[in-house]
Amino acid sequence: MALLRLSSERRAGSLIVTIVGDLDLVTSAQLDEHLAKTWRVASWIILDLAGVDFMDTNALAVIVNHWKKAAAAGGTLALAGARYQYTKALWITGLASKLPMYDTVNEAVEAGAAPQPKVGPA
C-alpha cells in the first residue's frame, strides 16, 4: 500500500501543505480530502512537492481541481520544489507553465506576501 504523509503549517500569511511520498491513484483521495480543508484557512496555498517521489495523472487532476477552486474563490494554489524526475506529469501536460511554480517554499512564501496579479485557469 502506498504511503503518503501530508502536513500543513502557516507561515507569513501562506498555508504550506507538505507532501511526502507517492501521489497516485491510491493516495489521490487522501490529497483531495486534505486540500478540501485548506481553503477555509488561507487563500495563498503552497504545495511543497520536494518530497514527492512519484506523481500520476490522478493526483494531477486533484491538484488542478483545487487550483481552479482557489482561483474561483480569489485565492492561489502554488507549487514549490517540484522535481521534474518525479513530477513529469506537470510538464508533459503543460501545467507547469500555467500553475504558479517556485523552486523553493521560501520563494513561494515571499511571492504570496507580495501583491499578486490575477492567475487562474485558462
Image (cartoon, rainbow, N blue to C red):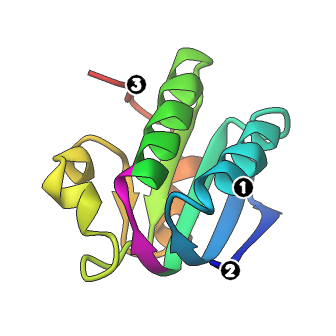
Q: Quadrant of the C terminus?
A: top left
What's the amino acid at mark 1? Gln
> Residue at horizontal 18%, vertical 48%?
93
Q: Give whichever of discs 3 and 2 has the lower sequence position.
A: 2
Does 102 sit left or right of 39 as displayed?
A: left
Badge 1 marks a residue whose secondary structure is helix
Occupied quadrant, residue 3: bottom right
- At which x and y percent is residue 95? 25, 46
Occupied quadrant, residue 75: top right
Badge 3 marks a residue whose secondary structure is loop
**Residue 68 vs residue 92, the one in the foreground:** 92
Query: How far apart are the alpha carbons under marks 1 and 3?
Result: 29 Å
Badge 2 marks a residue whose secondary structure is loop
**Residue 10 vs residue 98, the one in the foreground:** 98
Any mark on residue 3, and which? 2
Q: Main secondary structure of the magenta part?
A: strand
Query: How far apart are the alpha carbons under marks 1 and 2?
Result: 10 Å
Does 118 sit left or right of 88 as displayed?
A: right
> Residue at horizontal 46%, vertical 76%?
104
Q: Is residue 2 magenta?
A: no
What stretch of residues is rendered in magenta?
Answer: 53-57
